[in-house]
Image: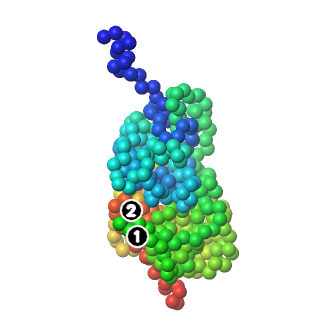
Amino acid sequence: MTTSETNKAWPDHKPTALLVLADGTVFEGFGLGAEGHAVGEVCFNTAMTGYEEILTDPSYAGQLITFTFPHIGNVGTNDDDIETVNMAATPGARGVILRAAITDPSNYRSSRHLDAWLKARGIIGLSGIDTRALTALIRGKGMPNAVIAHSRSGEFELHALKEEAREWPGLEGMDLVPMVTSGQRFTWDETPWIWNEGFGRQTAPEFNVVAIDYGIKRNILRLLAGEGCKVTVVPATTSSEDILAMNPDGVFLSNGPGDPAATGQYAVPVIKDVIASGVPTFGICLGHQMLGLALGGKTVKMHQGHHGANHPVKDITTGKVEITSMNHGFAVDKTTLPGNVQQTHVSLFDDSNCGIALADKPVFSVQYHPEASPGPRDSHYLFKRFAELMRAKKSA
């Protein structure tokens, strides 16, 4: 066989995407989704399902997601599974890293191939690298800053990409909430999806809830509405005076991205005022972390974070263990919590704090995502707990 015949039989697959870490490490692969480049923090997610919900979770702003499950895209995408409140908005992950090329969709709910969906949302993708090696690197060294780049020509300015990755300051001290919060207040009445019926509407609400939007997810709002709440969503910078003037039966502190200490510069004083008012308060994820700050605790950056499904968490108040979904790179330092704050939940992976409650007021929060249901719905009771606190407050 001649050289030309050999080249035809074994074509040279030139890399069309790169992942360039801040320490200069380069992973070569094949591009998918949008072209261009983006800088962020690389984390890994262990979930086997829910890739569309994960990629549109505003809590992932500023991050590049590595999926440890090798086959992504098999159920396609659809509008029902998007988690950003504004369907046209693109906050969420800056990039996605896969082991294998995207598989063709095989699901009756699919309306678009994942690759086309990524292009439409401006998300840069890379496939064909050893995601096990990348995950092992993150486990050993922590979540690195990096640049993901995709060019169909396979031409890259590698030196410039390395410089960009090295100079990006990272998520510590970074307030990313302004890029994901709503620009104005709005009301929400859509209830959870039911098989063969779709989403419903809350037409007879029992409670008036104000949700502070630090990057809120649609399914959180649905579960609140499903528990009898008329929900008014307000921007992250809304004052406590404006919130309390709405006479809420409860206040919800949403999930979101970035460093809670940075966002807390303007959010914590508002949360303190809400707590002092005696209004029942419930927080999730970033809302949990900033509640911890408002109650006198501190937050810390985690080594590799918790990202994925099937995270076991123990509810100390009941002794039960629930299987949860998580997405956080910061955590409340339980050793800094004052005496009037009870630790209610703890991770059975690393003993980190996963929930708190105030002893003398109807205030509680959890670190994980009780609205996310990749199978288990163990944590939905928390929305009922919030409703019970509001009901008790109204009847007092």
Q: Outermost residue, top direction?
A: 2
Q: Residue at x 47, y 64 (%)?
A: 219
Kindly identify the amino acid type of the residue bearing the numbered disc 2. Answer: Ser
**Disc 2 crowd, CA 10 A, few/some/many (<14, 14-19, 20+):** some
Q: Residue at x 41, y 35 (%)?
A: 129
User: Residue 213 falls in which quadrant of the image?
Assistant: bottom right
Query: CA separation, marks 1 and 2?
Result: 9 Å
At which x and y percent is residue 33? Answer: 49, 41
Badge number at residue 380: 1
Q: Is residue 230 left or right of residue 245?
A: left
Q: Secondary structure at mark 2?
A: loop
- Dot 1 or dot 2: first in sequence order is 2
In this view, 187 is above or below 143: below
Badge number at residue 373: 2
Q: Is residue 234 left or right of residue 30?
A: right
In this view, 312 is above or below 119: below
At which x and y percent is residue 261? Answer: 60, 58
- Residue sitting nearer the eye, 85 or 392: 85
- Residue sitting nearer the eye, 346 or 165: 165
At which x and y percent is residue 350? Answer: 40, 56
Q: Secondary structure at mark 1?
A: loop
Q: Residue at x 34, y 63 (%)?
A: 376
Which part of the image, by quadrant, shows the N terminus? top left
User: Residue 211 falls in which quadrant of the image?
Assistant: bottom right
Q: Residue at x 58, y 62 (%)?
A: 214
Cβ atoms under marks 1 and 2 closer than 8 Å: yes
- Residue sitting nearer the eye, 36 or 271: 36
Kindly identify the amino acid type of the residue bearing the numbered disc 1. Answer: His
- Residue sitting nearer the eye, 335 or 81: 81
Q: Outermost residue, bottom direction?
A: 396
